[in-house]
Image (cartoon, grey):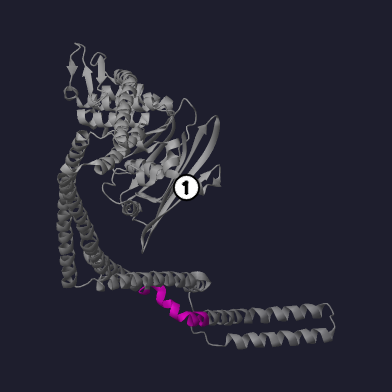
Amino acid sequence: MILDEITFHNFGLYEGTQSVELTPIAPDKPIVLIGGLNGGGKTTFLDALQLGLFGPYARSSNRGSLGYQEYLSRCIHRGANASEAGIKIRFRHTIDGREDSYKLCRFWKNSDNGCKERFEVLKNGESEPSLADNWASQVEEFFPANIAHLFLFDGEQVEAYASQNDSSALLGTAIQNLLGLDMVDQLERDLQVYERRKRTESKDNSRHSEITAAQDAVRDLRRRLDALKQERASLQTHRIDKQRSALRKIEEKYRKVGGTLYDQRKAIEKKWSDAVQCVKDGENALREFAAGAASLLLTRTLLDSAASRDQHEKECRSARELSAALKDRDKAALKHLCSHSADKVVVDALQAFFDADRADRENLGKKETVLDITPEARGDLHALLRGGLDKMARKAADLLRLQDIRRSDEEQARIEHANIPNADIVEKLTHERDELRSDIAELQIIHAAMGQEIDRQQRELERRGQSLERMLEADIKEKERRDDCSRILRHSYKVRHTLGAFRCAVIESHVQRVERLVLESYQQLLRKSGLVTRLSIDPKKYSITLYGRDAEPLSAERLSAGERQLFAIALLWALAKASGRPLPTAIDTALGRLDSGHRMHLVERYLPFASHQLLLLSTDEEIAGPYLERLFPWIGRTYRLVYDDTTGTTRVASGYLP
């Protein structure tokens, strides 16, 4: 199986739609290295794989006792106020030499009726509704959910598997699932139920009253247990959920009355003060501008008139200056024409023209000049009229527009400040909110106590049930009748014993292989080559015993924390090998609690060979420096999870952590 791509849509910390390519680029580069800081979305990435593949049966890190619908609702990203989230996983699987491509699309959405999920499976690009309807059983052919923890795990949590109880539970569950013994166990349970029914049918009158009393006691206890469960469910539905609903309403009311503004009142007051000061600064700038040449913008018409008047006066002065010169020139011109015997008509006409021209100029020169502008003043006047006034007008418009913006900002800040609610209103809502939170906490304590009481009564029911079963077994042994019922019970008993013998034989034969694989894996990872020389597994209790170089048992508690973590990883590695399934592996924080020597062994001897496809999620202090350098030849793709603390979102980017 090859994971090709995973796509997040408003899932957890991942806002919007983000896709991550996971296909190994080459067989000798199986590792996809994903770096991120603590709290940046690594565990969410691993949970997304589990949830996308297994849905309600996923072993998610933060689900706890939550119902599936509530868990889905909590997985929706909060920052974008989204009501829908989803996960898409694209993978390939080969059966009998034929490779098929699959795409899982799992989306869910909050509504008034709760959180509703929509699931679709595409095979080779075509929708397959039958696969989607029966995916819980179909996924077992690709990636069995009951062994998923052998391939998808958190490195910081696997150390617990090194303890006697946890390693026994892990081994027992894994071996049972790998060998398919869950079917044998189910058959045994079915036979026991059948035998119990037959024994009840065949009990004689001498034990009838005793058995009847025991059965009545079991029924009464079961009724009390059911009533307690209903009471606990009613507490959840009618009180805790009701109080949570009231809390949501109070929080919404707190928001509507401006509680958020009240929380930010100091920042709003500062914003308003800064805006008022900014307006004052703008007014001062306008006054300074108006105190200069800007006032001339109001006299443009007068300036134009002055320029025209100056031009007229210039012409008058020119006429006075030219009048005497023109008179002498005119006499000389006429005299010249006469000396050259010019036609008298022409001379008379020219003399008339000269006389009229001089008369006009003399009249113009006699007009009064008022302004008498100096050349410097004339230059300044022309500079203003040729662009200076326009430039000042543009600057004035810019200053006024900027001042309008400042006034608008000041008004907005004033409105925000005015909208800050009265402290009495907010404090009252805060008090109500705190009381509701306190009530919810108390109800949750009661809810948990009822859960403990249910567990106690459940154990009592099991004890009484076992006692009743022993009574029925004793009753059936005392019977000497050889009727059909006895024959059936006898054969059923033999079948159960045969199944038990079969289970023991299969387990014993398989345990030896698991022993060899665990020892080989552990010795390969250990820095101390002679620390563990042998190990054995009890085929009944699944307990593991380690032996040191002196052939004496070595307690797991005598191992260092790093050695225990390596033992847990070796155990998972060996069981994954024993499964015989080529499945991708995903590890979160693989090197978390190891010293440098153990880290290097894990980097060199385990990670490159853990699987044909390894998704390795690491912090900046794990796969870094020499570890990254040693692992680099096997790394095909690198990504980093970039967390934005201001928005509370994570973005997947190409390339490893810097």
Q: Can you tell which quarter of the image residue 621 is in?
A: top left
Label 1 element class: helix
* Mark 1: amino acid: Ala
Residue 591: x and y, percent? 29, 30
In which quadrant is the C terminus drawn? top left
Residue 177: x and y, percent? 35, 32
- Front residue (pair 385, 40): 40
Residue 131: x and y, percent? 49, 45
Q: Can you tell which quarter of the image residue 353 is in?
A: bottom right
Image height of 388 relative to 325, above or below: above
Is any atom of residue 436 visible in this view? Answer: yes
Residue 73: x and y, percent? 34, 55
- Front residue (pair 181, 501): 501
Question: Mark 1, residues whose alpha carbon is within 10 Å: few (<14), some, or many (≥20)?
Answer: some
Magenta segment range?
290-306
Q: Which residue is mark 1?
A: 132
Image height of 113 relative to 467, above or below: below
At 53% across and 39% down in the image, what residue appears?
101
Q: Residue furthest top?
A: 550
